[in-house]
Image: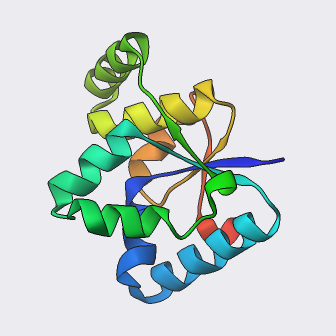
Amino acid sequence: MNGYYLDTQIWIDHYLKRGINGENALKFLKKVIGEDSIIFYSDFTITELKKTGFFESEINEMLRFAKPRNIRRIHLTKIQIDEAVKLAKQRGIPYGDALHAILARDHEVQLVARDLDFQKLKDITKSKLPEELI
């Protein structure tokens, strides 16, 4: 069984059906569910979605796309938060990107993202685009 940790923008691309990115996110999610893999998201993913302006009902709708057996919530630890703060400062990247990379690494799952800041985190985890995994 494979696991994938999705950056918040992938969830948004899919939910808002944003052009080709939305189409690729949908194809990727269908493939993941079809192969009975697991999609991971975190407490911080929920926080980012709320800060972006999504309501709880919309977030729940995003997450309901996957069957319950195909989705898992990851909880943050103080150690991960501290490491993300340090990495973000050292590399000049957003805290959230550092945290997503750390979570994917610590849970040994593939990070799926579009953000170029993840290129600065290749030593933590290597990200892939949804279309690379279809």
Q: Residue furthest bottom?
A: 19
Q: Is residue 81 above or below residue 110?
A: above
Please state the horizontal and vertical placement of residue 6, each as a whole percent of the image. Answer: 52, 53
Task: Give the image's coloring scheme.
Answer: rainbow
- Residue at 37%, 38% (x, y): give it: 43
Please state the horizontal and vertical placement of residue 75, each as a whole percent of the image. Answer: 45, 28
The answer to whether 94 appears left or right of 110 in the picture is left
Image quadrant where one finds the C terminus: bottom right
Please state the horizontal and vertical placement of residue 23, each as a whole percent of the image. Answer: 54, 85
Residue 127 can be seen, yes or no: yes
The answer to whether 60 appears left or right of 114 in the picture is left
Please state the horizontal and vertical placement of residue 1, each as a whole percent of the image. Answer: 84, 47
- Residue at 78%, 48% (x, y): give it: 2
- Residue at 50%, 28% (x, y): give it: 102
Q: Count the labels in the image.
A: 0
Instruction: State which quadrant residue 53 falls in.
Output: bottom left
Q: Is residue 68 above or below residue 16?
A: above
Instruction: State which quadrant residue 78 falls in.
Output: top left
Residue 134 can be seen, yes or no: no
Task: Say which of 65 and 86 sits in front.
Answer: 65
Q: Is residue 76 above or below residue 13?
A: above
- Residue at 40%, 70% (x, y): give it: 61
Task: Say which of 42 and 91 sits in front.
Answer: 42
Task: Say which of 6 and 56 sits in front.
Answer: 56
The answer to whether 125 appears left or right of 94 in the picture is right
